[in-house]
Amino acid sequence: MEQPKGVDWTVIILTCQYQESVHVFQTELEVRQKREQIPPGTLLLAVEDPETRVGSGGATLNALLVAAEHLSARAGFTVVTSDVLQSARILILHMGRDFPFEDCGRAFTCLPVENPEAPVEAVVCNLDCLLDIMSHRLGPGSPPGVWICSTDMLLSVPPNPGISWDNFRGARVIALPGSTAYARNHGVFLTDAQGFVLDIYYQGTEAEIQRCARPDGRVPLVSGVVFFSVETAEHLLATHVSPPLDACTYMGLDSGARPVQLSLFFDILLCMARNVNREDFLAGQPPEMGQGDSDGAGYLQAARTELWRELRDQPLTMAYVPDGSYSYLSNSASAFLGSLTFPRAPRARVVHSQVEELELLGGGSSVVSCLLEGPVQLGAGSVLQHCHLQGPVHIGTGCLLSGLDTAQCEALRGLELHDLVLQGHHVRLHGAPGRVFTLVGRLDSWERQGTGTYLNMSWSEFFQKTGVRDWDLWDPDTPPAERCLLSARLFPVLHPLRALGPQDLLWMLDPQEDGGKALRAWRACWRLSWEQLQPCLDRAAILASRRDLFFCQALRKARHVLEARQDLSLRPLIRAAVREGCPGPLLATLDQVAAGAGDPGVAARALACVADVLGCMAEGQGGLRSGPAANPGWMRPFSYLECGDLAGGVQALAQERDKWLTRPALLVRAARHYEGAGQILIRQAVMSAQHFVSMEPVELPAPGQWVVAECPARVDFSGGWSDTPPLAYELGGAVLGLAVQVDGRRPIGARARRILEPELWLAVGPRQDKMAMKMVCWSLDDLQDYCQPHAPGALLKAAFICAGIVHIGSKLSLREQLLQTFGGGFELHAWSELPHGSGLGTSSILAGAALAALQRAAGRVVGTEALIHAVLHLEQVLTTGGGWQDQVGGLMPGIKVGRSRAQLPLKVEVEEIIVPEGFVQQLNDHLLLVYTGKTRLARNLLQDVLRNWYARLPAVVQNAHSLVRHTEECAEAFRRGSLPLLGQCLTSYWEQKKLMAPGCEPLAVRRMMDVLAPHVHGQSLAGAGGGGFLYLLTKEPRQKEALEAVLAKTEVPVLGVWLLVGDRSPHCGPPLSRGYSCKSPDHLAA
């Protein structure tokens, strides 16, 4: 089912505890906007909570005020007005409290998942998942208003959760299913049959929880997601000027108000629940508020009085999503590891990481954004995140390692860690940056209550094992109840003589008989508790180091993907590098791959990736990617490539590139020239087809005797584009084509003869007896534009060069070459009765005809297979490129499949398809051509296809494989002689063409095809599409006149088609057995 259109948010706000983090998280929101996760017009705000402990309710009120203030200013108001909320769609995301396993909070917990559809490659954080859920799953369909979402949980919501917003007003909570056991330590909703919330229980009694149970035995959990209608949001916003609720906002605090702690669910929403009465509500307090604070309780009662007054009349409903799931990210390391690992999986989950020895990763473990070099062993159920490790390193089961790099690997040598959490942190102490490491046990409790543990052992056992004493960790006046892991000064942050490392904590796992040296070194350090460490964390440095590591492994990935010839798209990675300011290292890596490649395909793809980087840097400005690539500044690097000096060429390209990086127009032009460089390498690869060009000498015709080659057109039934280099030799191609006459004529031909004058006479026209363009070449200078396709007579000039009649680089003049070898010159005429851009393979077939006639006139015979490869060579010399299907279709007889393997040298093999007796005539009766009147722009289509192939876009790669596979299915349909099956093949083929080259179906053509659809089994535009001829299989035989009547208003001609399989006249059926007919001088008068 199609994903709903995302919400076009007006404002997204991310609330956070620490003032130092505001800029960091603002940047993170902006990065996600650049990644296209957030609409471009959305206002992004990171907002500091007014006080650390204002609670989720206070943070919500403050965020709503800030949003209204910014929108009011944008609208030109000088004061805050709730009118700006009327059409606004606001999303408030709460960062919540500190989290022991992620320095940037639960929102930035990295998950072992990848989004293959993401336009920009990036590690997926919990924040990204929640943004996707709110934008594409819960948000669509809701009216303007305010969504509030916590980030302290992992959510799963189906694509279409089925929430109805008809006649909605008030507030709505989103509930997800949970077990009654889970609910004992969580919040649940009690609702009536209409979905109105009656009460909200936190850690309710067994009876209360059972009262909330659904028919399936599960209960609706408080999920942390709420929606306020505009009306309800206005009521809530109105409280920001009412004491003591004004103290929840920065305005109140700036005015000297005393802070008040409010819960979103158990203060703001609870007052709307139908079963809650005023007295109980005013007397109660939220679970997050401490007990025994009588002053605070009185202050809270005043705040709740204001909430009751403003919100009590607002209806509160619940939307239950039975197919969703909810998991709170608690402070339990075991639970956290459980959410990041896959117990029943046979292999590790490796995400955005490069691992040299994958077999050393235990089943069910996960590795996220890491670079693991050498033997790094990871036990089952363990997690590595943001680590660059060099083996040998052995990490056992039940471990979480994060934020470590190669400098810490030595401390891990010889150890086998089990059930431990080892983290590296970036801190700033009195303005100085530093690195700190923390080590805790998987089973350790982070709660203040209870006896407590450290490194999975009781405190007493720890003290006895290590020699550490309680006074090392807590001040003497610290009450016993406060002596817990949170407050223990365990973690060294500064040593007087050396840098710190994991060894300053790892010694505690197995204290050696070292006379207390390790203990003394630990005691000599300035140490902080986990609580004291949190305000010192340098979150900007943490995220920057993660980004550096991500791109470090991404560069390794890019190199590996290219060198291993993997069908994996690098375009999301390219976008990531450009949008996050790291294109330079990527360009350098691509240069290295291209320069060192032994395979021209690898080098060409690397250059295409450079072009993509440059195009991405232009940010959609600077013009179209397709365009000319012959600027004089790039000729020097091109000359290196033409001469086979790949390394020199790549270096020269990079030097020239540096001059073109200053503005979008130059970047786009540079990208075109990199694609031009890639075309040189493709051309050299295709030139390998020369291996299969051979000829036999025969008697030289007398001067003046014409040799005529006449050819049919070709109709492609399946597989087109797979024959196009580089697909033809990287993927392997297969195309099914038909040689056809058009209205009883072979529409393409050439004729050649020797002349006494040592010159070349060239002529091109629409018919054999009508030459529109004539020219004479007297010297080699007249042939120099043979490689410029649009130059007059370029194809014919290239034919003389490829036939070996003229050597363009020879020291002999043209006159001398011709007299020395042939005793005179040549006259060559070529013609096509088909309109330009027909899609019927005209130019390639014409090249084949010209070569065949010219070689025979020069006293040589070229076999059809050799001629197919000779045309490939000619088109590369001509620089038009192109594949082999046209010449296979027009030079070989009847129905056939051409194939090329995924290898060089490029060789085309042809198989004739044998059809049932009588089927050829049936096909002739049902196959028609319709000229669309649109001129095809195949070259631009070709550039787009090659660009997308080199980018290895998943849809293009999959479609290319389908084209080849579909060809074999189409061949079987011909063998069976089934017109309906062939019609299905045509229809599928046209859909594949459109996937390969979007834009190849003009609107006028689509309308024409819609008109014809009831009359045909199937239809497709010929060749690459975009215009030219439309060919179709009619349901009834001999439908030319009938379809002319159907298309009468379009004024387009309908042409008859005859399949060329036998030497018979057009009047009695298909009229030719040899794809091309080359008449020797013996059959013609001089």
Image (cartoon, rainbow, N blue to C red):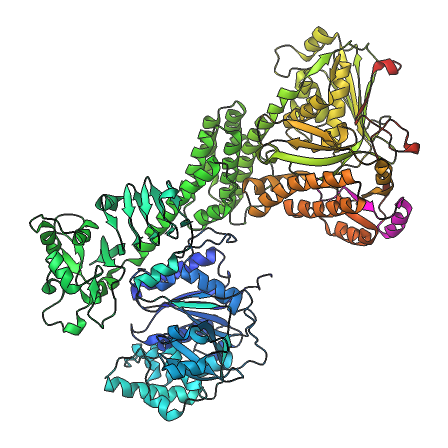
User: Residue 725's spot in the image, x, y percent?
Assistant: 61, 33
Indicate left or right for 489 with 166 as reference: left
Front-lying residue, 229 or 957 = 957
Residues shaded magenta: 1023-1050
Front-lying residue, 815 or 22 = 22
Q: Residue furthest right?
A: 1067
Front-lying residue, 155 or 81 = 155
Front-lying residue, 310 or 1062 = 1062
Query: Vertical placement of 114 versus 449: above or below?
Result: above
Which quarter of the picture shows residue 179? bottom left
Residue at 8 percent across and 51 percent down: it is: 516
- Queried whether the magenta region covers residue 1036, the answer comes back as yes
Answer yes or no: is residue 523 visible. Answer: yes
User: Residue 254's spot in the image, x, y percent?
Assistant: 30, 76
Indicate left or right for 306 with 2 as reference: left
Figure quadrant of the N terminus: bottom right
Indicate left or right for 762 with 157 as reference: right
User: Residue 466's spot in the image, x, y percent?
Assistant: 12, 56
Figure quadrant of the C terminus: top right
**How many numbered dots are placed on residues in this image?**
0
User: Residue 767's spot in the image, x, y percent?
Assistant: 84, 29
Answer yes or no: is residue 761 visible. Answer: no
Indicate left or right for 1064 with 133 as reference: right
Query: Vertical placement of 598 versus 1081: above or below?
Result: below
